[in-house]
Amino acid sequence: MVKIIDRIENASTLLIKRIASETNALICSGAPIVNLSQGAPNLPLFEPAHTAASAALNSRRLPYTAVAGEESVRHTCAEFVNRNILKRQEGQGGETTIFTAKNVCVTNGAVGAVYCTLAIQISAPKDVVVSPLPSYGLYKSDTELLGGTFCPLQCGSPEDGFRITPSVIRGAFETHGENLRV
């Protein structure tokens, strides 16, 4: 417990916190901003969603969902990746299915998914997580909170869309070798 507290107390100020503070100041001054960076925005009620949620609650049939997400949703995601990303369809010969529902985990947001992925990869300070810059601030703070070492990779420039080159990735592997986790 003390180790976690020390990590929290010694964590550097995150850029995302500064951005959130500046965004909140703008919102308070009346700027027309919808803040999507800190959870659900304060938007008007979407009546069809409210009606569906009310009906589900009133039915009193609210079983827990599978930890990895509903199988039908996972199946649809796997099918989408196979067909649209990997360009594979049933009946085209050869191995047609790379991903199945068993290979997919659906979470209710990326923050939890990233944290869980890091948590299963990091077990010691020697475990290194590399991330191209610019990156989301929680990658660094989650890595440090879990006891790993965060290593930013400087990639490209704004002009080239911060392009990641093979030499940058090769350099990370050469530098960190078997300690490289994510």
Image: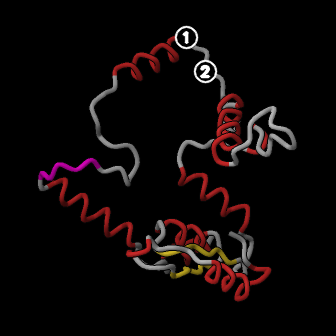
Name the residue tied to disc 1: 59
Of 78 and 140, nearer the camera is 78
Of all residues shown, which one is farthest toward the left? 29
Q: Three-letter amino acid code at disc 2?
A: Leu
Q: Is residue 78 left or right of residue 9?
A: right
Q: From which residue to which does the magenta span run?
A: 30-34
Rendered residue at 48%/69% (across/down): 135
Query: Residue farthest to the bottom?
Result: 175
Residue placed under numbered mark 2 in the picture: 62
- 141 left or right of 180 in image: left
Q: Amino acid at mark 1?
A: Ser
Q: Position of residue 144 (x, y in %)?
A: 58, 74
Q: Is-magenta flag for residue 57? A: no
State if disc 1 and disc 2 touch (CB < 8 Å): yes
Secondary structure mostly seen in the magenta stretch: loop
Which residue is most to the top? 59
Q: As rendered, which of 145 and 150 lies closer to the eye?
A: 150
Task: Specify the quadrant that holds the N terminus.
Answer: bottom right
